[in-house]
């Protein structure tokens, strides 16, 4: 089933809601990371690299093909075999994955993660979020967001299809596993709670009514975010984003940008975001710390050791 065949059935969701359904799974994120970093394209390649069961891997790859992120390509190796190649839609996820890598390295004590080299200037860089219009740095505090009339979070997604993946990963896994990021993005409700916080929600009752989330699930996600240092519980019962939480806006920015650029959504369910200092419509880019130029996919690469 192609991505275009699946999309009309899910069009009642917001584009961001659909993105959370697609990407809100740890195995999916790991498969995509290995595809970008190690250029893995075969079923056996992911199975051996991730230690994932064949049934789980088969279901995730089928979904990624169905959503138009991978496409099957036949090749001959004694007999006809198939490999999974990233489509243009899939390739546009690279900024999201680089943003995850950067946040994890800077905010989750993973500074030993592999460096990123900008081939245009030859420097190892720490990418940062910038405005595509004025090329100035951009943060959550620099943006103004106006949800559409039907952009309510109870419509952001449907029930998860998979059980939450629990994975114990050693600190020596420096290729793609980013535990703190995947605690947020690898679970749809976690990502929805954080997205609501970026839009100004801070109280339990408002998270619950806006998201349509069960109290027990919300309690669990808020507890996890406090433990991660993403939320700061206040004496008045509210939850405020910490500096670590606010920094995750860079990841959220590219998730929203990819979703609203690649996926259809219910009319009026989008988020209208503007960069306050220059007034331009939201156009997030990754900028190079060394030369301050936008980072393009074909002009950057991870330096893998070993």
Image (spheres, rainbow, N blue to C red):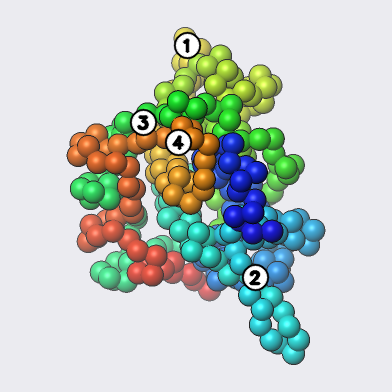
What residue lies at 72% left-to-right and 42% top-to-bottom? 161
Q: Quick one: which residue is furthest to the bottom in this view?
A: 78
- In front: label 2 or label 1: 2
- Residue contact between numbered discs 1 and 3, judged by CB atoms under 8 Å: no
Q: CA distance from mark 4 to mark 3?
A: 10 Å
Picture quarter with the N terminus:
bottom right
Q: Which residue is mark 4?
A: 270
Q: CA distance from mark 3 to mark 2?
A: 38 Å
Q: Which residue is mark 2?
A: 72
What residue lies at 24% left-to-right and 34% top-to-bottom? 276
Query: Within 10 angstroms of label 4, few (less than 14), some, or many (20 or more) residues?
Result: many
Q: Which residue is mark 3?
A: 145
Q: Secondary structure at mark 4?
A: loop
At which x and y percent is residue 173? 59, 59
- Residue contact between numbered discs 3 and 2, judged by CB atoms under 8 Å: no
Give 47 or 171, whichever is nearer the viewer: 47
């Amino acid at each position: 089933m192609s991505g275009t065949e699946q999309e009309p059935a899910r069009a009642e969701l917001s584009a961001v809601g659909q993105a959370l359904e697609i990407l809100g799974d740890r195995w999916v994120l790991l498969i995509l990371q290995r595809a970008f970093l190690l250029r893995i394209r075969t079923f056996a390649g992911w199975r051996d690299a991730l230690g994932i069961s064949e049934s789980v891997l088969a279901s995730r790859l089928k979904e990624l093909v169905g959503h138009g992120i991978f496409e099957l390509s036949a090749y001959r190796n004694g007999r006809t075999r198939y490999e999974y190649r990233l489509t243009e839609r899939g390739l546009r996820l690279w900024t999201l994955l680089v943003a995850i890598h950067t946040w994890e390295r800077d905010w989750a004590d993973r500074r030993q993660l592999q460096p990123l080299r900008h081939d245009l200037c030859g420097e190892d860089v720490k990418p940062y979020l910038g405005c595509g219009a004025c090329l100035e740095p951009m943060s959550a505090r620099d943006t103004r967001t106006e949800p559409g009339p039907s952009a309510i979070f109870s419509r952001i997604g449907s029930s998860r299809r998979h059980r939450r993946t629990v994975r114990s990963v050693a600190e020596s896994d420096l290729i793609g596993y980013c535990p703190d990021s995947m605690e947020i993005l690898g679970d749809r409700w976690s990502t929805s709670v954080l997205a609501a916080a970026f839009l100004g929600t801070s109280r339990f009752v408002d998270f619950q009514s806006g998201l349509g989330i069960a109290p027990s699930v919300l309690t669990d996600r808020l507890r996890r975010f406090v433990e991660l240092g993403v939320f700061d519980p206040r004496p008045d019962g509210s939850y405020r984003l910490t500096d670590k939480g606010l920094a995750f806006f860079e990841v959220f920015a590219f998730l929203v940008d990819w979703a609203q650029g690649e996926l259809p959504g219910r009319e009026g369910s989008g988020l209208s975001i503007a960069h306050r200092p220059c007034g331009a419509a939201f156009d997030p880019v990754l900028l190079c710390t060394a030369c301050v130029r936008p980072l393009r996919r074909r002009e950057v690469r991870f330096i893998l050791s070993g």
